[in-house]
Amino acid sequence: MDEPRKRVVGEMSGLDIHYHLGEGHPLLGRRMPDLDIVVAREPIRVFELMHAARPLLLNFAPLDCLDIAPWSDRIEYVNAKCTGAWELPVIGKVDALAAVLVRPDGHVAWIGDSSDAGLGDALTFWFGAPVASACRTGQVKGA
């Protein structure tokens, strides 16, 4: 009786909460799972990166392929590696993603494939207008 058990556990823990943020991947609008990932050749869990309660952009594609410079004062950008399928509470297994934007509350606000389509819109909607400045000091973890 694995399916009913997973559903009930998901409901009791709040992992079944799904905000409707548009069509797309089943993880969109759900809690980001606490995956084992590798950042700068060191193993770490996703939730460890979320302790600061800041927006988090996890890039699993080639290093620094996403440009968030106009939001770098507000967003934590992390290059990471994760292999294999992801096991998501309530949903089950899904293929690994190229990039994920996680809100400070832990819910996924944007999912990237091989491009950054829609990323600027999601960043602006959730975290405000981009800052136009010639001098930014945003740091990228895992580079």
Image: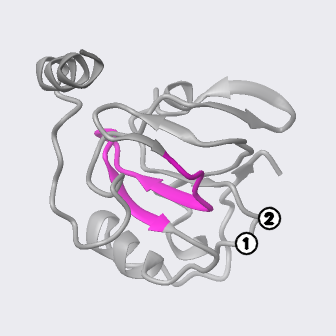
Closer-to-camera residue (68/80):
80
- The magenta segment: 94-111
Q: Residue at x 80, y 64 (%)?
A: 62
- Residue 88 is situated, as x and y percent measured from the top left of the image, at 41, 36
The vertical placement of 70 against 55, above or below, is below
Q: Marks 1 and 2: CB-CB under 8 Å?
A: yes
- Which of the 4 image quarters holds residue 43? top right
Closer-to-camera residue (13/103):
13
Q: Residue at x 34, y 43 (%)?
A: 104
Q: Is residue 46 left or right of residue 15?
A: right
Q: Residue at x 39, y 70 (%)?
A: 123
Q: What type is the residue that disc 1 sits on?
A: Cys
- Which of the 4 image quarters holds residue 133? bottom right
Report the residue marked by disc 1.
65
Q: Residues within 10 Å of mark 1 (few under 14, many from 20)?
A: some
Report the residue marked by disc 2.
62
Q: Is residue 46 magenta?
A: no
Q: What type is the residue that disc 2 sits on?
A: Pro
The vertical placement of 63 against 67, above or below, is above
The vertical placement of 3 against 129, above or below, is above
CA distance separating discs 1 and 2: 6 Å
Asked which secondary structure carries label 1, the reply is loop
- Residue 83 is situated, as x and y percent measured from the top left of the image, at 72, 42
**Quadrant of the snapshot with the N terminus:** top left
Q: Is residue 104 left or right of residue 69?
A: left
